[in-house]
Each structure stands twice: as C-alpha cells, then as structure tokens.
Amino acid sequence: MSSKLKYHKNYTEFHDSYQLVLPLNLEGLVPNDESVRLLSHVLEELDYHDLYKAYSHKGRNPAVEPKLMFKIVVYAYSQGIYSSRKIEEACRRDINFLWLLAGAKAPDHSTISRFRKMLHSGICEGLFSQLAIFLLKTGEVTGKNLFIDGTKVESRANKYTFVWKKSVGKHEARMHGQLLEKVDEINREYLKGLGFHPETAKEDLYAAIEDLKTTMEQHGIQEVHGRGKRKSQIQRDKEYLESCLKRQEKYDIHKKNFKGRNSYSKTDPDATFMHMKDDHMRNAQLKPGYNIQIGVDSEYIMGVGVFADRSDTNTLIPFMEKLEENLGYKYESITAYAGYENEENYIWLEKERKIPYIKPLTYEKWKKRSFKKEIGRRENMTYIEEGDCYICANGRILWNVGQRRRTSATGYITRQDIYRCEDCTGCPHFGKKCTRSKKYKQLYVSKVFVEKREVSLKNILSPQGKKYRMNRSIQVEGAFGVLKYDYGFRRFLMCGKTNVKTEFLLLCMGYNINKLHAKIQHERLESHLFELKTA
C-alpha cells in the first residue's frame, strides 16, 4: 500500500540533485546588441529629480529604486507587456528584466501598479521631453518639419456606461415642466407663495421643501412610513419635491462632467463616446475613448496629446503649444492631413511663422471629373474681383449682400461674406444641381480661409510638399500602426485623462528607444526622410 504524497510550498525540499551552473553573472547571457542595453544606457542619462520628489522622505525606502522601476516599466511597454501582473512575471523569469534589475528584488504587481499611478503625466511628460531633446541634440531628428496625426484609442470604461447630453437635457426639461405644475398646485392647496425657475431649481426646491416641513410642524402632521400607513397629501408633495431635488443634483453633476462634450462615461468621466476603427460588430457602435495626437519627426515621436474632442480640428493648436513648450524649440513647418484644416489653424500657423502643409478637405474631390458637374459649388463659379461677385454656370450674378459671423467651439470668430443670386427665376438648374433652396442661390464665403487654403495648396503641390505628404503617411501613420498592431496596444488599462496620458507616454518612450535601436542595427542613423520614387 503506497503512502500519501507530502508536498510543501518550498520545492527545494525535494532534495533533487542539480549541478550549479556558472556563470552566476547574467552579463554573458544578454546579447551585446540587445535593445535592453541601449534602453538602460539612454534612460540612465535622464534627470529624475521630479520623480524622486514624488516620494516621501519619511518612512521606509522604496522596495525598488525609482529610476530602476522607471526603466522596468518603459522596457515592459517597449516589449508589448502592459499588465502589472505580467510585468511582475517577466521580472521573475525574463533574463532581460533580470539583467535590468541587476540583482535587485523583483517588484510585485501591486508595487508596479502603485508606481504607474504615482507617475502622473507631469513627471512622465518631463522625462519623455528629455528623451526627445536628447534625440534633437544628437541630430537624430531634424527639428524642421513635424508630421501630425491622431487616432482613437478605447478607454477602460464599459461601453454601456454612457451619459448623453441631449437625453439629460430632455429629462431635465420634462421634470421642470412637471415641477411648475406641482408648485402651482401646492400654492393653490396651501395658500403658499412658492416660486420655481429652471435656472434656480435647486435653491427653489430647497426653499419649498423647508416651507412644507414648517407647515407640517405647525399643523401637527407627523410623517408616516411603512405598510398600512396612509400618508397625508402634504407629505406626498414634500417627498415628491425631495425626489426631484435628488434628480436635479444628479443632472447638475452630469452637466458639469460634459465639459463642452455631448457624452461621457460614468466609470471614466474624461472619456468621450466615439466611433472606433476597430468595429468588429460592424454596427458603428460608439465606445468610450480618447483622441490621441502625436507629432513625429524623423520617425521618432516628439510629442503626445490626449483630447476628448472627436475630431482633430480643434486639437492642433493646444497640441503644438504644449509640445513646443516642453521641447523649448519651435518647428518651421507642419504637415497634417485634411482633418486639421480650418481658418483658425491657418491663422495660428501664420502667426507662429510656420509653413503649413495641410491638404484641403476637398482636395481628393477636386481631382474627380464628377466634381466639375457640381455647378452649385463656389469652386466651379467665376469670381469677379472688381465687382466682388460670382457668376454661376447659367451666367447669372451672385452679389455680395452682407456678412455673417460664426463662433467656433474654441471661441474663434469667422466672418463670412454672403453672396446671393440676383434672380433665379427660370433657371434650369435651380432646385436640382445648383441649390435646394426654394427662393434663391446663396453662398457663404470666408475670404481669409480661401486665401490661406490657396497658400497651403501651393505648398503641398511643390516638390518638397509632395515629399512631406508621402513621409507623413509613412512615418506618423506607420507609428500608429506599430503601436496598435505590432505592440498590440488597443485599449488603456487606467482611467482618467492624466493616467491615460502617462500610459501612452510610456508606450511612446519604448517606441522611440526601439526605433533608435533598429536604426543603429540597420545603420540608418540620421536618416530623416524617405525619398520619392522616380519613374
């Protein structure tokens, strides 16, 4: 009869005989051209003063030195390892991580998680900027032209935690209408002088509830609760107003969290619901996410921006201002795709003396034959500068009859000239190809925008502009392709705009070091632009 097996947590007690293998030093086990060596060397040169300031001088020392911890996290992100538990596992098993630890105790997942949360975007952005400045000083980046693009990355929040601005407004307006009726009813019933206005809803509800409580005390009416108890009408009215007050407080919180947006997530209020490119259900479902902006120079990421805007139009100016503030350096020109085109961006680039290489929004349409058939468009009409008027395809004149002003979400005011046809009577194109209006053809034209667009169009059609446009699609879109598909980064692990930016900065630092490593190994240092193919 066999005896029971007795196992212990310490497996070395099995007394199996193993020969100790030399060397104990891991130096010889890590190849000389391994990227972890380059990462350790480059990150060693950074200034970690702000990182060490985040630690308290009181209490025990950290389990792992902060600088070493930062190296571990950046290297993990460069290898596509994002989970704190998987980073812990790599620190215990992976030779490259063990070499990086240099004999120090491997951190556990809770230590890694706390460090990543403590490493807010200010500290991480400072270290990222130091790396970018290092690349700038060594001549690895030109510092002349910046390629800009954005992408949507899904938040950690659940996709069914949405709050819609229109829905909140509709429910709030319905409640206010019911409250107006209820307050009138209370005034008639108890001869009160209560008032209610939507703009002071909370204050008016507080006052009404306190007034009803006072009335109940004066008449000796006791509140009753539970089964078999009949509530008085005044108690019912008071409880209804209290429920409306709670709803109003909830609506106020929602309106505060919108911050100019049309939606947000309950579990990640900084996230906005957006259309994602990865739509596996093919139903155009909106998901909580962030609009991530990057600026690339010579294949390296020089700046990162995290925005709640679903479109890229309003992100260019704040992104560039923050990037140049961090670098302490100004770029000469900006290359971006058509999604960044608007009058405000053109004016800002001109003010900052930057050359714009922005493709017009309708550039691809202009190249099609069908565009010429759209006779109602301004581009297909003849402009007469002397008379400040347009002549349509039927030979009729559209005169300048005034101006209108449009204010954007950022507060920028655009002035548009209004051109109206003198007479559309009997025109064979009216109501079909030219305009849908039932009265007359009308154009709204911003002369400033048209002028700046012509400058940018001329720039992108030049030999330098064509080269920049080709490199933009290769370098900045290629960077997003590597991060999303090669590194497998499709969703953030942390909530909040600050944490999200920290996480993406760590990813981009790993990307930049991997890019430097690849250029060294392939002898491509100081190669900045890809050349156009010649026939």
Image (spheres, rainbow, N blue to C red):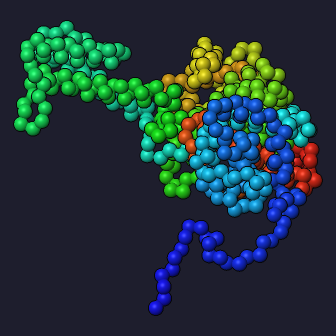
Which residue is located at x 67 percent, y 39 percent?
A: 61
Quadrant in which the C terminus is drawn: bottom right
Please identify the quarter of the rendering in which residue 92 is found. Answer: bottom right
Which residue is located at x 65 percent, y 22 percent?
A: 445
Q: Position of residue 139 (x, y in %)?
A: 92, 38
Which residue is located at x 33 percent, y 25 percent?
A: 248
In this rendered view, identify the residue nearer to me: 244 or 13. Answer: 13
192 above or below 115?
above
Q: How many marks?
A: 0
Q: Position of residue 50 (x, y in %)?
A: 72, 30
In this rendered view, identify the residue nearer to me: 496 or 346. Answer: 496
**In the image as oriented, which residue stretches furthest toward the bottom?**
1
Q: Position of residue 369 (x, y in %)?
A: 71, 44
In this rendered view, identify the residue nearer to me: 200 or 24. Answer: 24
Q: Is residue 141 visible?
A: yes
Q: Would residue 534 appear left or right of 424 to someone viewing this image?
A: right
Which residue is located at x 19 percent, y 8 percent?
A: 193
465 above or below 392?
below
218 above or below 74?
above
Q: Would residue 504 appear left or right of 102 to someone viewing this image?
A: left
In this rendered view, identify the residue nearer to me: 47 or 466. Answer: 47
Q: Position of residue 354 (x, y in %)?
A: 82, 26
Q: Is residue 429 visible?
A: no
